[in-house]
Amino acid sequence: MADLRHDIETALYREAHLLDSGEFNAWYELFLPEAIYWVPAGSGDYDPNEHVSIIHDDMTMLKKRIDRLYSGHAYAQIPASRTHRAITNVEVEDEGDGVVNVRCVMMLVELARHRQTLYPARVTYRLHRAGDNWRIGYKKVSLLMSDEPLPAAAFLF
């Protein structure tokens, strides 16, 4: 279990690095083609079809979101935000057959226009082993302040 946990933590740290480095296309490649990326608007939301979402993307929509960030037309990202993510409290539940459910806490700090904003969140993943790597089948980012007024966050959590 310790080796599995280490592998998962390494995968999560790599994902955080790709996002913080602005390598969004490489980050996109971590997802399976049928994956879902969800940022619910309410703290207790459990179904994106029943609750309001900040983001609820399949891979087609996520690719459009990424393309927009690269296009220069995401005006809330001119200049681009700088971010740092810290991943902690990683819990791994092995379902077998190369599938794991992961829960962790993420502390995301954004620096935009000389202002820092903190976005603490609980993140839930469903990861699938693909050779020596892990691919994301599902990612849910439950922001601590999701039901509070949010700044115009045009970056990816």
Image (spheres, grey):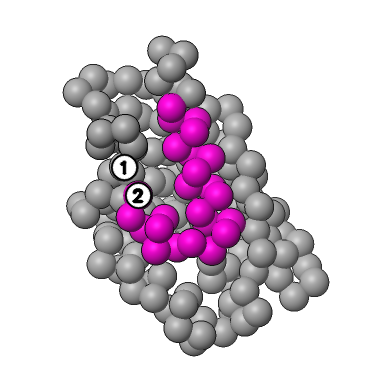
Q: Secondary structure at mark 2?
A: loop
Is tag 1's residue or tag 2's residue first in the polypeptide sequence?
2
Most frequent secondary structure within the magenta stretch: helix
In this rendering, the answer to whether 28 lies above or below 127 is below
Q: Is residue 46 left or right of residue 20?
A: left
Toward which corner of the image does residue 125 lie, by quadrant? Answer: top left
Q: Residue at x 33, y 68 (%)?
A: 63
Was residue 63 drawn as part of the magenta stretch in this picture? no
**Left or right: where does residue 3 sit relative to residue 20?**
left
Element type at mark 1: strand
Q: Is residue 16 magenta?
A: yes
Query: For this rendering, which residue is in front, 140 or 156?
Result: 156
Regarding residue 145, the answer to whether it shows in the image is yes
Q: Which residue is mark 1?
A: 135
Q: Nearer the viewer, residue 62 or 122?
A: 62
Q: Residue at x 50, y 43 (%)?
A: 14
Q: In the rendered image, which quarter is residue 24 located in?
A: bottom left
In this picture, which residue range is highlighted in magenta?
Answer: 7-30
- Please identify the residue farthest to the front as the structure is shown: 132
Disc number for residue 30: 2
Label 1–label 2 contact, CB within 8 A:
yes
Mark 1 Cα-neighbour bin, 10 Å: few <14, some 14–19, many ≥20: many
- What residue appears at the point 27 percent right and 21 percent down from the top-left corner? 95
